Amino acid sequence: MPTLKLASWNINSVRARLPIVGQLIEAEAPDIICLQETKVRDSQFPHADFEEAGYVHRYLHGQPMHHGVAILSKVPLQEERRYDWQDNGEARHIGVRLPNGVLLENVYIPAGGDVPDREENPKFGQKLDFYERMIRWSEALDVPTIMMGDFNIAPLECDVWSHKQLLGVVSHTPLECETMERLRASNDWVDIGREFVAAPERLYTWWSYRAKDWRKSDRGRRLDHVWVSPELKSQVKAHRVLEDARSWDRPSDHIPLITELEL
């Protein structure tokens, strides 16, 4: 049975980090790449580079300087969709249908600012509202679906370097974690990361640029995720994070996730 290899990566500007996207392609040769935070207009996307690399099918939802998502594929895809879960026109989602009929949703959920209070910090409220819109969408799903991207929440105690110290920090507050769990429960989503690296084993996908030596301090968080509908669980054959990519030249603060599933 054929296997499809998917990569998901918050690249933090696809044009600025095109060389390390090429490094990922050379090392892993994914069939489909889901990028978040591309930070480029669709018209200015580096089409020629991906065309040359074999990604002849490209689905883009971009914006200049901020946000932006893209799905780049070697295999034909169908039914491009763009959901405005932010409810303000920000480019934070692009979806397609795989050759076997499964939906693939690439999402970049807002970070939510620095203060975990919607009155003091409207960005935090926007993040929670984004999740609420996704919950309503998820509850109505009746098609097998893969959802991947930057969810900007590290839900488990072992998904952060210090649960105690981060309880009041946006991305690991109890309210965010409870909201994310309601999204997961809304469709019985399977958290593939923790299927392959069981809690409480260490598993991070993001390290701040502020650390002089990110590996030595290792103050990581698991902000990037791959979820699948329960009926797809048995088809997922491999999943891993490419932690060494955090040390590549001019790195993103996120690392790629690689998932392989049978069609």
Image: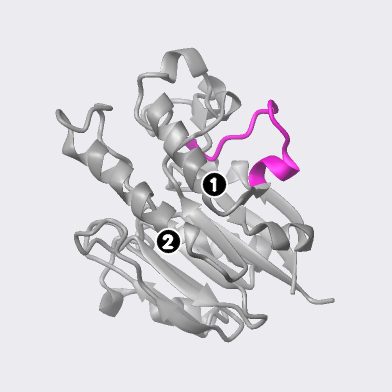
In the picture provided, is 157 more to the left or to the right than 208? right
**In this rendering, does residue 68 appear at all?**
yes
In the rendered image, the vertical position of residue 17 relative to residue 174, given as above or below: below
Q: How is the image coloured?
A: one colour
The structure residue drawn at horizontal position 77% and vertical position 63%, both measured from the top left corner, is: 235
In the picture provided, is 69 more to the left or to the right than 199? left
Name the spot of residue 236 as percent of width and height, x first.
Answer: 74, 59
Q: Residue 233 occupies which quadrant of the picture? A: bottom right
Nearer the observer, 42 or 131: 131
- Residue farthest to the front? 140
Q: Say what secondary structure mark 2 lies in.
A: helix
Q: Earlier in the sequence, mark 2 or mark 1?
A: 2
Image quarter (top left, top right, bottom left or bottom right) of the C terminus: bottom right
Mark 2, residue position = 137
In the rendered image, the vertical position of residue 29 relative to residue 78, given as above or below: above
In the picture provided, is 150 more to the left or to the right than 31? left
The structure residue drawn at horizontal position 36% and vertical position 28%, both measured from the top left corner, is: 210
Name the spot of residue 75 as percent of width and height, x first.
Answer: 61, 83
Marks 2,1: beta carbons within 8 A: no
Image quarter (top left, top right, bottom left or bottom right) of the N terminus: bottom right
Q: Residue 14 occupies which quadrant of the picture? A: bottom left
Q: Residues within 10 Å of mark 1 (few under 14, many from 20)?
A: some
The structure residue drawn at horizontal position 62% and vertical position 74%, both measured from the top left corner, is: 102
Mark 1, residue position = 184
Name the spot of residue 63 as percent of width and height, x first.
Answer: 24, 66
Nearer the observer, 214 or 56: 56
Residue type of the residue flagged with mark 2 = Trp
Q: Say what secondary structure mark 1 lies in.
A: helix
